[in-house]
């Protein structure tokens, strides 16, 4: 798994790819952490377009990031959540924990407000 990181205004856009399981979850944590730590009110968008699998440790990393961002009055949004990931998030009752957007422009606009 590799995570590309870019910025659009004040929003950090993370684009992980592959499977968010096992060791790749640590890579995701290491990609998200500086985005939260270096900002007073972090705004993060995670694009799941190229992620084809996530397990409970991946969900845990996302929940940990959300908790850390929320403590700093930050927000995390998601786009392009595939069916497998969406089903897992709904089943684990975490669906309302993240802001869902239809596309990147809407997400950046929504997270920047």
Image (spheres, rainbow, N blue to C red):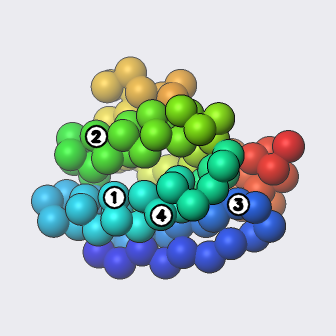
Q: Residue at point 15% right, 65% down?
A: 23
Number of marks drawn = 4
Q: Which comes sooner in the sequence, label 2 or label 3?
A: 3
Alpha-carbon span between mark 4 and mark 1: 9 Å
Q: Is mark 1 on a helix, strand or loop?
A: helix
Q: Is mark 3 on a helix, strand or loop?
A: strand
**Image quadrant of residue 88?**
top left
Alpha-carbon span between mark 2 and mark 1: 10 Å
Q: What element carries label 4?
A: helix
Packing grade of label 2 (10 A; few <14, some 14-19, many >=20) is: few
Alpha-carbon span between mark 4 and mark 3: 13 Å
Mark sitting on residue 29: 1
Q: Name the residue under label 3.
A: 11
**Image quadrant of residue 98?**
top right
Q: Residue at point 38% right, 37% down?
A: 63
Q: Which comes sooner in the sequence, label 2 or label 4?
A: 4
Residue 45 seen from this side: no
Q: Looking at the picture, how far across and down is residue 35, in whole percent?
A: 54, 61
Q: List the single residue furthest toward the top.
A: 93
Q: List the single residue furthest toward the left.
A: 22
Q: Residue at point 77% right, 56% down?
A: 108
Q: Which comes sooner in the sequence, label 2 or label 1?
A: 1
Alpha-carbon span between mark 2 and mark 4: 17 Å
Q: Do the residues labelled 3 and 1 touch (CB within 8 Å)?
A: no
Mark sitting on residue 34: 4
Q: Nearer the viewer, mark 4 or mark 3?
A: 4
Mark sitting on residue 3: none
Q: Name the residue under label 2.
A: 60
């Amino acid at each position: 798994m590799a995570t590309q990181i870019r910025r659009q205004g004040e929003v950090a856009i993370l684009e992980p790819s592959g499977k968010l399981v096992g060791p790749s979850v640590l890579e995701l944590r290491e990609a998200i952490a500086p985005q939260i730590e270096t900002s007073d009110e972090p705004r993060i968008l995670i694009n799941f377009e190229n992620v084809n699998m996530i397990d409970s440790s991946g969900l845990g990393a996302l929940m940990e990031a959300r908790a850390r961002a929320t403590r700093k009055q930050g927000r995390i949004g998601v786009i392009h959540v595939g069916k497998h990931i969406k089903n897992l998030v709904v089943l684990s009752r975490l669906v309302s924990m993240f802001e869902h957007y239809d596309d990147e422009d809407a997400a950046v606009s929504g997270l920047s407000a």
